[in-house]
Image: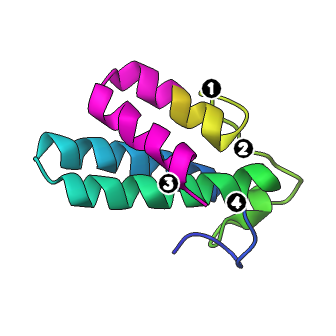
Amino acid sequence: MFKKGKESGFLDKVEAMTLVIRSYIYLQMKKRKDAEECMKEAYRIAGCFDKEPSFSGSCFRFVNLTSDTSFHDGLGFSAGESIETILSILDNKELIQLWRNEHKYGN
């Protein structure tokens, strides 16, 4: 919705991190299948971002930038690193296992 075009950008990194948090919430609600689906999508999106990371502000729709702007977070350079940071903060063994399963069996 807020992303301009189909190219991978910072919003994809944010979406991947958000999906991991959604996965955690689904686990807390005892909805494992939904948690697995969120984690699978987070893994896919993180992989796309990490192949060609872009932190440019030009990916935002509805934002008129007058100069080159980039966006960063303090969780890690790559989407994968940021997700690993989130996993360590949440410290949930089941969630960590879902992420490891995606690394093992994901595309």
Three-letter code, disc 2: Phe
Give the magenta part as a residue range. 85-107
Q: In the rendered view, does 57 fall on the left or right side of 103? A: right
Foreground: 72 or 98?
Answer: 98
| C-alpha distance separating marks 4 and 3 | 10 Å
Mark 2 residue element? loop
The residue under the point 34% across, 20% down is: 91
Q: In the rendered view, does 41 fall on the left or right side of 58? A: left
The residue under the point 72% across, 44% down is: 71
Q: Check disc 3 and report the residue beneath it.
A: 42
Three-letter code, disc 3: Ala
Q: Check disc 1 and report the residue beneath it.
A: 74
Q: Check disc 2 and report the residue beneath it.
A: 71
| C-alpha distance separating marks 1 and 3 | 18 Å
Query: Is 44 drawn above or below residue 104 in the view shown?
Result: below
The verdict on residue 105 being magenta is yes
The outermost residue toward the left is: 30
Mark 4 residue element? helix
The outermost residue toward the front is: 105
Q: In the rendered view, does 62 fall on the left or right side of 54? A: left
Determine whether label 3 and label 2 are within 8 Å by CB. no
Three-letter code, disc 1: Gly
Q: Which mark is residue 48?
A: 4
| C-alpha distance separating marks 3 and 2 | 19 Å
- Picture quadrant where residue 79 is located: top right
Mark 3 residue element? helix
| C-alpha distance separating marks 2 and 4 | 17 Å
